[in-house]
Each structure stands twice: as structure tokens, then as C-alpha cells.
Amino acid sequence: MIESSSRLICSLCLLLACCSGKHGARGSTTEVDPNGYCGDATPALLAAQGAPSAPADPITEEPDPNSTCNAVVRSYPIPSVIHVPPCSAVEYQTNPPSAGDHYPIYPRYGVYSAAIPRGFWVHTLEHGGVVLTYSCADCEDEVSQAEELIADTEPALACCTASGCPKDAANQLLLTPDPGLSTAWAASSWGFTLTADCFEPSVFRSFVDAHRDTGMTPELICSDALATDVTRRGPE
């Protein structure tokens, strides 16, 4: 989407104090009020996430022969994409989402302890990012492994030059719970998904390496300069 539009949205958010707060360091967990994203609308948005009423057929479907957790990578066609009002209901054609309509406000890259409504983080995919999601319970060890993967990931080469990476370059990764998943773990990029029954670091690392900033996304944004701190206060 047009960068100037994102700047305008973030400027409006600054007036509402939703762009305030600390920028999370790569791999750091953001502790939040579970309803902080969209206030009273958050529980209903999260409850509505799940299997699509009109699912898209995958273009490709490739089970990982080395996975012990039934990991499958799928590719999907990109539907029409527009910005919709923040905190409005959005249904996606895949679970987890791989593209689609989304909010003009998007979260900073990093690790989140409370589920983010999908309309926010699908915008992250449009920027070349990869979003890791999970619905498992009592899987703290697996979550820790996912956090470690994010902490150990450097910015993509496309975000840097021969002289190095900008100080504000992020690794374009985000981790959030997602109660609407039909599998314990998943990952999303623009046009691709990974689903699995558990978190296998090597499998998810391969997905990140293959699908982060593939050059197919509408725009590459490597920093959090225009991102919104939606965890502190949701849009009015």
C-alpha cells in the first residue's frame, strides 16, 4: 500500500497516543492487556478467527518429508487487497491467512504474549514479513524455541547494503498466539503458509529463509519507523 497513507495513519495514531511506547527489541516479548488492541471489540475479533467460509484452493501443497509434526507448506493465489477500518471484521480465505484485506495500521516486528487480531498482522505479510502463530496450550518450551529463532535471525539481505544494515533494520519476524488456528503451529508469508502439529525449529527456519521478503510482496519495509504500538492502545 502507499507509504504516504501509512504515514498519515500513524500521524493520526500519534494524536491518539497509539504510536507511543517503547520499540521492542528483536525477540523481546511485549506484555499487553489482551484487549489492548481493539478494546472491547478484541474478544469478538479473536473468536471469529478460524476456518474460512469460502476457502481458497492451494496452488501447491508440499508436505515436509523430514517433519515429524505433519508440516505442510502451501502456496495460494493473492486475492484483491484493500485497507479496511481498524478493528473491523475481516475474513480470510486461508487459515492461517496468507494475504487479503487488512488494517492500515500494522504492529512492530517482535514477540507478543497476547493474540493480535489478524487484520493487523496480515499487513506485516504485505511488507515481506513472516508471522509465526500458535494455538497450543502448555507448550512453553516450543514458544521459547520460536522466540529463540526470532532472536537469532538477522535482517534480510534485501534490507541491507554491502556496507551493512541500517540501525533501524528489523528482521521482519513476528510471533503471536492465534486461537483460530486449526493446527498447533503455523507460519504465514505473502502467498504462503506453513502448518504443523508442533514447533520444529529447522522446519520453521526453512520457511523463514525461503519466504521472508521473496520480492513478490507489494512493498518491502524493513524497519518499524511507521509501525504502530497497537498493544498500548487500540484505535478509537
Image: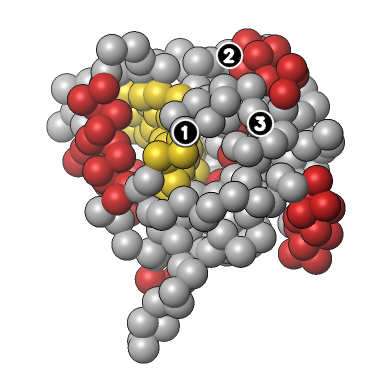
Q: In this view, does 77 lie to the left or right of 201?
A: right
Mark whose residue sits in front, 3 or 2: 3
In the picture of the structure, the residue carrying the numbered disc 3 is 37
Where residue 167 sits: x, y (%)? 44, 74
Label 1 with label 2: CB-CB less than 8 Å: no
Please report the residue visible at 64 percent of the width from the left and 28 percent of the height from the top.
Answer: 36
Please report the residue visible at 56 percent of the width from the left and 36 percent of the height from the top.
Answer: 98
Where residue 86 sits: x, y (%)? 78, 35
Q: Earlier in the sequence, mark 3 or mark 2?
A: 3
Secondary element type, mark 3: loop
Q: Which amino acid does label 2 sit on?
A: Ala
In the picture of the structure, the residue carrying the numbered disc 2 is 51
The tally of labels here is 3
In the picture of the structure, the residue carrying the numbered disc 1 is 31
Q: Is residue 91 left or right of residue 9?
A: left
In the figure, residue 43 lies in which quadrant?
Answer: top right
Label 1 with label 3: CB-CB less than 8 Å: no
**One can see residue 70 in this view:** no
Residues 71 and 197: in front is 197
Q: Which of marks 1 and 3 is nearer the N terminus?
A: 1
Q: Assign the N terminus to one quadrant of the image.
A: bottom right
The answer for how far apart the CA atoms under marks 1 and 3 are is 12 Å
Q: What residue type is labelled 3?
A: Tyr
Secondary element type, mark 2: loop
Where residue 131 sits: x, y (%)? 47, 40
